[in-house]
Image: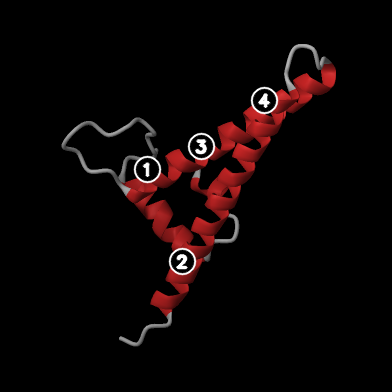
Amino acid sequence: MAISSISTGLPSPLLDALKRNQAAQGGGLSVAPAAAGTQVSFSNALQQALQSVSSAQNQAGELAEAFQADPSKVSLEDAMVAMQKSQIGFQSALHVRNRLVSAYSDIMNMQV
């Protein structure tokens, strides 16, 4: 996933820093869990969290469509729980983004 696809609402200097970090890591972000004793980078953790939220939203959408198509195959409870999980995940990701933007603004307003 490219940095530009997760950049909604981020200031351009922060985007530039994320792009430089991605380029320094070889141009791509791996989402495999880190082996014991290796360091986990923030960008990898953020990427993995965003992909988790995206997959939860996709699963909730698929369950909702399946329930609409044939309610006897998918239970309403499963569809509703999946939708709530995806909503909670999205809200959490939104709060993290807002905190990142706030922290970036605070750092940029510091007197050196």
- Left or right, 53 with respect to 43, comes to right
Q: Amino acid at mark 2?
A: Pro
Question: Where in the figure is residue 51, as x and y percent of width and height?
Answer: 51, 37
* Residue at left offset 42%, top offset 52%: 19
N-terminal of the pair, mark 2 or mark 4, is 2
Q: Which residue is mark 4?
A: 78
Which residue is most to the top?
73
Expressed as whole percent of the image width and height from the top left, the position of residue 89 reads 56, 44
Please state, as top left, top right, bottom left or bottom right, where the C terminus lies in the image. bottom left
Q: Please tell me whether mark 3 sits on a helix, a strand or a loop.
A: helix
Return the mark for residue 13. 2
Q: What secondary structure is found at the residue carrying circle 4? A: helix
Q: Would residue 97 be seen by someone viewing this image from the given angle?
A: yes
99 lies above or below 105:
above
Between residue 100 and residue 90, name the one nearer to us.
Answer: 90
Cα distance in 3D space between marks 1 and 4: 30 Å
What is the distance, in whole Å, between disc 1 and disc 2 at their CAs? Answer: 19 Å
Q: Earlier in the sequence, mark 4 or mark 3?
A: 3
Amino acid at circle 3: Gln
